[in-house]
Image: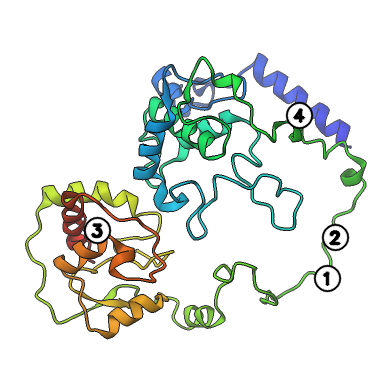
């Protein structure tokens, strides 16, 4: 039967290639333009196909990484909270707790370039130039001890770089493997209810039982902060708020704003300006913020500016790993954007 299905699929493929179905045949849609095809054709392959001209060095990549990536991945690719670790992990793949990084696990350098180009930075994908991605890829090689600090990655030398784990990847042969093809899939005696019986080694991964109960009892609860007795925000600098929206992309990995905003790694920030600190419903705050909340502080412009400048210094012990916004103009723009983020 399997051979028959393969033969059927092959004949269908050949038929499609020799007699392609066009938009005119079905009367639906239109052929894609060359510009539309080019916009989607952005993949980079292990043989170098798809790589743009250009290059970037480790030093430049370090600057871009600190600005665009470190908030989630740490300054040296060590990872923040549950965000992926990008460096280290050598000689751990055979252990009970393998650390799968670019240096320890990934097969091809093209995978690094392609993913960064296609999907990063989080919330602002494909905003980096080709040279930026070359530089970031060079920096990621450096933090994995695969190149020196004066290394420059270019289209010309790209294929010369080989990742340590490349030889351990091979074509998926499960359809032909007797180990899988001879096995019958069990679909009997399945559990009707799922219960948490063990907790993950990383203790903040498994949902809290109390939190689950609260969601079940209040599925439509509002996550917006409880407003304090503060003057309502009326005037918004639309131009400054627009700038702040762009800067806020650095925060979107953990925080949402808007009518449908939900708590994520960090609390939802809708209506946050003028609200009491630590008052977002349903979010479990760290001890540092619980203590701040006990002081009766409010998220006004001054407090937000101080916090955004150096979060860890302002609230010692906070779980928030964001390094902060060094530029005052960026902080003021974000605050203005948050003023506009109301229901």
Q: In which quarter of the image is the N terminus?
A: top right
Q: Label 2: state its secondary structure.
A: loop
* Residue 39 rendering spot, x and y as whole percentages: 42, 26
The residue carrying pointer 2 sits among few (fewer than 14), some (14 to 19) or many (20 or more) residues within 10 Å by Cα, namely: few
* Residue 308 rendering spot, x and y as whole percentages: 25, 60
Q: Are marks 2 and 4 in contact (CB under 8 Å)?
A: no
Front tag of 4 and 3: 3
Instruction: Say which of 113 and 323 sits in front.
Output: 323
* Residue 172 rendering spot, x and y as whole percentages: 77, 36
The residue carrying pointer 3 sits among few (fewer than 14), some (14 to 19) or many (20 or more) residues within 10 Å by Cα, namely: some
- The label number, if any, that marks residue 309 in the structure image: 3
- The label number, if any, that marks residue 189 in the structure image: 1
Q: Are marks 2 and 3 in contact (CB under 8 Å)?
A: no
Q: Can residue 39 be seen in this view?
A: no
- The label number, if any, that marks residue 186 in the structure image: 2
Left or right: 318 as drawn, with respect to 94? left
Residue reaching furthest left? Answer: 235
Front tag of 1 and 4: 1
User: Compared to 264, does 246 lie above or below?
Assistant: above
Q: Do the residues labelled 1 and 2 touch (CB within 8 Å)?
A: yes
Q: Could you give the CA–CA distance between mark 3 and mark 1, rounded to whole angstroms?
A: 56 Å
Q: What residue is drawn where x is 67% and y is 77%?
A: 195
Q: What residue is drawn where x is 88% and y is 39%?
A: 177
Q: Label 4: state its secondary structure.
A: helix
Q: Label 3: state its secondary structure.
A: helix
Instruction: Say which of 84 and 264 sits in front.
Output: 84
Left or right: 118 as drawn, with respect to 188? left
* Residue 314 rendering spot, x and y as whole percentages: 28, 68
Q: Which residue position holds label 4?
A: 9
User: Compared to 242, does 255 lie above or below?
Assistant: below
Left or right: 61 as drawn, with respect to 112? left
């Amino acid at each position: 039967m399997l051979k028959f299905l393969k033969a059927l699929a092959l004949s269908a493929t050949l038929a499609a290639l020799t007699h392609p179905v066009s938009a005119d045949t079905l009367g639906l849609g239109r052929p894609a333009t060359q510009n539309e095809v080019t916009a989607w054709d952005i993949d980079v392959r292990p043989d170098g196909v798809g790589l743009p001209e250009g290059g970037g060095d480790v030093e430049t990549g370090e600057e871009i990484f600190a600005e665009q990536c470190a908030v989630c991945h740490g300054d040296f690719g060590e990872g923040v909270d549950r965000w992926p670790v990008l460096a280290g992990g050598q000689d751990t793949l055979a252990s009970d707790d393998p650390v799968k990084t670019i240096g320890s696990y990934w097969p091809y350098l093209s995978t690094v370039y392609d993913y960064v180009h296609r999907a990063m930075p989080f919330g602002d994908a494909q905003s980096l130039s080709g040279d930026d991605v070359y530089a970031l890829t060079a920096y990621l090689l450096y933090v994995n001890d695969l190149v020196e600090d004066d290394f420059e990655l270019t289209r010309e030398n790209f294929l010369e770089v080989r990742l340590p784990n490349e030889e351990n990847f091979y074509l998926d042969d499960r359809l032909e493997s007797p180990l899988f093809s001879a096995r019958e899939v069990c679909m009997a005696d399945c559990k009707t209810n799922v219960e948490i019986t063990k907790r993950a080694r990383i203790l903040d991964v498994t949902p809290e039982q109390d939190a689950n109960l609260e969601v079940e009892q209040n599925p439509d609860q509002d996550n917006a902060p409880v407003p304090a007795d503060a003057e309502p925000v009326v005037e918004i600098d639309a131009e400054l708020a627009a700038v702040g929206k762009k800067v806020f992309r650095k925060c979107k990995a953990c925080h949402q704003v808007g009518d449908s905003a939900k708590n994520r790694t960090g609390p939802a920030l809708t209506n946050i300006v003028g609200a009491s600190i630590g008052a977002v419903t349903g979010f479990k705050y760290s001890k540092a913020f619980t203590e701040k909340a006990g002081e009766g502080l409010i998220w006004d412009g001054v407090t937000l500016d101080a916090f955004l400048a150096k979060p860890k210094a302002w609230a010692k012990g906070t779980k928030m790993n964001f390094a902060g916004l060094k530029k005052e103009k960026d902080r003021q723009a974000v605050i203005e954007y948050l003023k506009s983020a109301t229901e």
